[in-house]
Image (cartoon, rainbow, N blue to C red):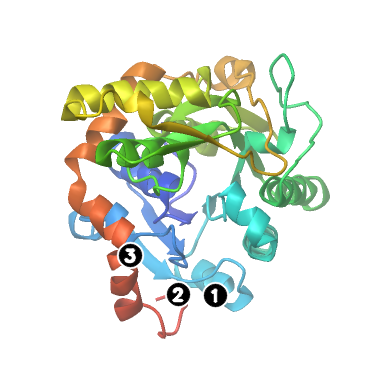
C-alpha cells in the first residue's frame, strides 16, 4: 500500500497512542516518508515513549516541541516540513482532569484542531482526526454506529464532539480531504498511569488499594493500542473523504471484571501477597460526576469498507500489557516520580517553540 503523501505530521506523538502509532509506522507499515512529531510535552507527553526512534530513523523522524493551539507554531511547522498529511492525535484526554480544569481541554482539543484545520485548508493537506467513543454518550443497549447522535456528558467528551464537528464542517465547506475515527478505550504499553488499566496494574503490584468507581459495573469497549494503530493507518491511507469510522475492540467488559483479571495476572506474575489474592484490595469509591455507564461501538463499517478488524483478544492483550509494565520498572519509576518532567524542563521548557 503506497500512501499519497510523503511528509506526515503526527500531533501528540509523545503521548500513549501517538508514540505507539509512530513506532507502528516505522516498524510495521513500510512507510518510507518523513514523520514530524509536534508535541507540547504536557504531563502525559513523554519523550521516553519514543526512545531510540530518532537514532534508528534519523532520516525519517523529526521532533518539534510546540503547541497545536499556537497559530505561528502550526504555520511554521507546515511550511518548514512541507507537510502534506496530518494525523491529529494531540488532545487533553482524561475525563477526571476535564471536570477539574475544562478550559485546558477547550484550548487544546477545540482551538488546537481549528489551527491545524486552517493550516491544512490553506495547503490542501490530507487530514485525519482521531476522536473518541465518548462523544456518543452512554448507551443502555445496542452499539453506537457512525450515525448515532452525539450526547457528550463530560467537558472532555464535549470538547472532542466540538472538534469532530469542526472537521466535518471543513470538509463540507472548504472541500478539505478529512476523515474522522472514533475509538473505544485503548490500553497497552506507554499508557500514563492515571488510566484504569495501568493504574490498577501498578497499584496491585505494590499491594495498594484498588479504587473502583461506583459499583464497578460501568462497561467499556476495550481496544489494544496496536489494533488501533493498524486501523489509523488504514483510514489515513485508504479512508474516504468526509467519512467517519468507528474503531473498537469488540470486547465489552465492566470495570470490575477488568480489575479482577488484572489482579489474577499480577498474582500469577509476581506471586500472591501475604494477605491473600490481590482482588481483596478492591475498594469501591464514590462515582465521579457524569460518569457514562456504557460505551459500545459498531465496527461493521470499517470492517466492510477497509477490511479492518482487531487481531488481539482482550485476554491475550491484557496479559501482554501486564507483562510490559512489570518488565519496564525504570520507565514506570521515572513517570511516577516525575523524573521525566525534570528532563523535559531541562531540555525544552523556556526554549522557543517552533518548527526546528
34 sits to left or right of 284: left
At which x and y percent is residue 251? 50, 17
Quadrant location of the N terminus in the rendered image: top left
At which x and y percent is residue 166? 76, 51
- At label 3, counting other C-alpha atoms closer than 10 Å, the crowd grade (few under 14, some 14-19, many 20 or more) is few
Q: Are marks 1 and 2 in contact (CB under 8 Å)?
A: yes
* Real-space Cα separation, disc 1 to disc 2, in angstroms: 7 Å
Q: Which mark is residue 73?
A: 1
Q: Are marks 2 and 3 in contact (CB under 8 Å)?
A: no
Q: Which residue is mark 2?
A: 355
Identify the secondary structure beneath mark 3.
loop
- At label 2, counting other C-alpha atoms closer than 10 Å, the crowd grade (few under 14, some 14-19, many 20 or more) is many
Residue at 64% across, 59% down: 100
* Real-space Cα separation, disc 2 to disc 3, in angstroms: 27 Å
Which residue is more in the foreground, 205 or 249? 205
Which of the 4 quarters of the picture holds residue 296?
Answer: top right
* Real-space Cα separation, disc 1 to disc 3, in angstroms: 27 Å
Dot 1 or dot 3: first in sequence order is 1
Identify the secondary structure beneath mark 1.
helix
Q: Which residue is mark 3?
A: 338
Dot 2 or dot 3: first in sequence order is 3
For the residues carrying marks 1 and 3, which lies nearer the camera in this image?
A: 3
Amino acid at each position: 500500500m503506497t500512501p499519497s503523501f510523503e511528509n506526515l505530521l503526527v500531533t501528540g506523538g509523545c503521548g500513549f497512542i501517538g508514540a505507539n502509532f509512530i513506532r507502528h509506522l516505522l516498524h510495521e507499515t513500510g512507510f518510507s516518508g518523513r514523520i514530524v512529531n509536534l508535541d507540547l510535552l504536557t504531563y502525559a507527553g513523554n519523550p521516553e515513549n519514543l526512545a531510540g526512534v530518532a537514532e534508528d530513523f534519523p532520516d525519517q523522524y523529526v521532533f518539534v516541541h510546540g503547541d497545536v493551539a499556537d497559530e505561528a507554531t502550526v504555520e511554521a511547522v507546515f511550511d518548514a516540513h512541507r507537510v502534506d498529511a496530518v494525523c491529529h492525535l494531540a488532545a487533553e484526554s482524561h475525563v477526571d482532569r476535564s471536570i477539574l480544569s475544562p478550559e485546558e481541554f477547550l484550548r487544546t482539543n477545540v482551538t488546537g484542531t481549528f489551527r491545524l484545520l486552517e493550516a491544512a485548508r490553506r495547503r490542501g493537506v490530507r487530514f485525519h482526526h482521531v476522536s473518541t467513543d465518548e462523544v456518543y454518550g452512554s448507551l443502555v443497549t445496542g452499539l453506537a454506529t457512525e450515525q448515532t447522535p452525539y450526547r457528550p456528558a463530560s467537558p472532555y467528551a464535549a470538547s472532542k464532539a466540538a472538534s469532530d464537528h469542526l472537521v466535518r464542517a471543513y470538509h463540507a465547506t472548504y472541500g478539505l480531504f478529512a476523515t474522522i475515527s472514533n475509538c473505544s478505550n485503548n490500553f497497552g504499553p506507554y499508557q500514563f498511569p492515571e488510566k484504569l488499566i495501568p493504574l490498577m496494574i501498578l497499584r496491585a503490584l505494590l499491594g495498594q488499594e484498588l479504587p473502583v468507581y461506583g459499583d464497578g459495573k460501568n462497561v467499556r469497549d476495550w481496544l489494544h493500542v496496536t489494533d488501533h494503530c493498524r486501523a489509523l493507518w488504514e483510514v489515513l491511507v485508504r479512508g474516504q473523504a468526509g467519512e467517519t469510522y468507528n474503531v473498537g475492540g469488540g470486547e465489552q467488559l465492566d470495570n470490575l471484571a477488568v480489575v479482577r483479571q488484572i489482579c489474577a495476572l499480577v498474582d500469577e506474575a509476581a506471586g500472591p501477597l501475604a494477605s491473600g489474592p490481590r482482588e481483596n484490595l478492591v475498594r469501591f469509591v464514590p462515582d465521579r460526576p457524569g460518569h457514562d455507564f456504557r460505551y459500545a461501538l459498531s465496527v461493521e463499517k470499517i470492517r466492510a469498507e477497509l477490511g479492518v478488524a482487531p487481531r488481539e483478544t482482550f485476554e491475550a492483550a491484557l496479559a501482554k500489557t501486564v507483562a510490559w509494565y512489570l518488565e519496564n520498572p525504570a520507565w514506570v519509576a521515572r513517570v511516577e516520580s516525575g523524573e521525566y518532567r525534570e528532563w523535559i524542563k531541562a531540555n525544552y521548557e523556556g526554549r522557543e517553540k517552533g518548527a526546528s
